[in-house]
């Protein structure tokens, strides 16, 4: 939009769904677009990306994409339409898979990230360095930790029968979790996973494992908060498990997590238990947590303090606002 000779820059936030709480973020934008629910999901992402472009008529307008792949869609739509926009891609989650689809997506990301009108953030600087290597480039990644919400903290009572919790979908190494539980028959485990993961694994063979699926968010959080500790074994170096890790920290549950270039930004020896892929190592750490509750709680407190100070909603919004301003200054008009 133009008023005389003064350019009015619109800031639009594009969100891939409307199921989460974005109240902390939306006030900083002139317009918010929620992508519609479609099956397959990519149809909804495409519709949302197109709506975002239609609502930002000028090349000086900025579209901030909560979901990284939607930023790539927006970029290519603007190229096809010869209608440039400034684009901010929040926290890339590109995975290291040797599939034809992943190779195609990698090419799409690499081309888009070369454009000075698109800037991207990463939740870990080490992951950003890995992306540079994977994409054969040198990109302008900004560190933006995933956001920690106070509403993850709930009031709960200790469980009558303490158990170890593991839950979630994205990037979980359920086979490793099976091997851990199998080696610890005297320890109770509670797993929350997708129906497909239940079918693929043999948890029914283990008498010490309780399996649940598709719990409502508050029920999931309650099961987590009643546990003695939270395990997050991962099978990817891309960002995964961070929301569950935040939830565990919010309720002072010690976190045992696979050490990757992403998770090392959050889980350090003083803030939790960064571990490899050896199930025996996990078993030893779980035994340590169960035998020394005070030490485990100290680590949980340290993790929550770090998240409250470095990953708060206020910090997230401030970094994002600064990134939008710098992108406006550096982009060609």
Image (cartoon, rainbow, N blue to C red):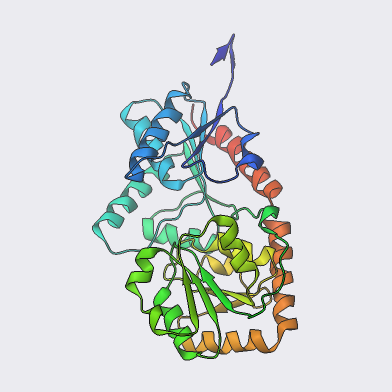
Relative side of 279 to 263, left or right: left
Relative side of 253 to 236, left or right: right
Residue 11 at x, y percent in the picture:
56, 30
Residue 95 at x, y percent in the picture:
39, 60
Regarding residue 214, the answer to whether it shows in the image is yes
Residue 296 at x, y percent in the picture:
69, 80
The residue sitting at the left extreme is 100
Residue drawn at the location 66% of the way across and 57% of the way down: 152
Front in this rendered view, residue 138 or 260? 260
Residue 199 at x, y percent in the picture:
33, 70
- Residue 30 sits above or below residue 132 on the image: above
Relative side of 27 to 118, left or right: right
- Residue 154 sits above or below residue 285 on the image: above
Regarding residue 278, the answer to whether it shows in the image is no
The residue sitting at the top extreme is 4
Front in this rendered view, residue 276 or 5? 276
Q: Quadrant of residue 84?
A: top left
The residue sitting at the front extreme is 160
Relative side of 188 to 50, left or right: right
Disc tally is 0
């Amino acid at each position: 939009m133009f008023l005389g000779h003064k350019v009015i820059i619109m800031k639009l936030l594009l969100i891939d769904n409307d199921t989460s709480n974005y109240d902390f973020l939306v006030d900083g934008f002139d317009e918010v677009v929620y992508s519609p629910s479609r099956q397959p999901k990519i149809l909804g992402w495409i519709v949302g990306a197109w709506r975002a472009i239609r609502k930002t008529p000028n090349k000086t307008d900025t579209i901030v994409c909560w979901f990284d792949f939607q930023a790539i869609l927006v970029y290519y739509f603007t190229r096809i339409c010869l209608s440039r926009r400034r684009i901010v891609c929040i926290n890339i989650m590109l995975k290291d898979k040797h599939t034809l689809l992943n190779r195609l997506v990698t090419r799409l990301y690499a081309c888009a990230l070369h454009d000075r009108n698109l800037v991207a953030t990463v939740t870990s600087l080490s992951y950003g360095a890995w992306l540079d290597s994977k994409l054969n480039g040198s990109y302008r990644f900004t560190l933006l930790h995933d956001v920690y919400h106070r509403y993850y903290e709930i009031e709960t009572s200790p469980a009558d029968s303490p158990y170890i919790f593991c839950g979630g979908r994205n990037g979980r190494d359920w086979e490793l979790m099976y091997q851990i539980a199998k080696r610890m028959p005297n320890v109770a485990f509670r797993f929350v996973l997708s129906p497909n993961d239940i079918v693929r694994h043999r948890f029914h063979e283990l008498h010490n494992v309780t399996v649940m699926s598709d719990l409502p968010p508050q029920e999931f959080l309650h099961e987590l908060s009643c546990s003695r500790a939270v395990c997050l074994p991962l099978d990817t170096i891309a960002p995964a498990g961070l929301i569950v890790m935040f939830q565990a920290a919010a309720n002072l549950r010690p976190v045992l997590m696979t050490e990757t270039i992403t998770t090392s930004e959050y889980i350090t020896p003083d803030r939790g238990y960064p571990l490899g892929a050896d199930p025996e190592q996990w078993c030893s750490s779980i035994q340590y947590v169960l035998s020394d509750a005070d030490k485990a709680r100290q680590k949980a407190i340290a993790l929550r303090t770090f998240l409250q100070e470095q990953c708060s909603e206020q910090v997230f919004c401030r970094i994002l606002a600064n990134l939008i301003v710098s992108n406006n200054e550096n982009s060609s008009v």
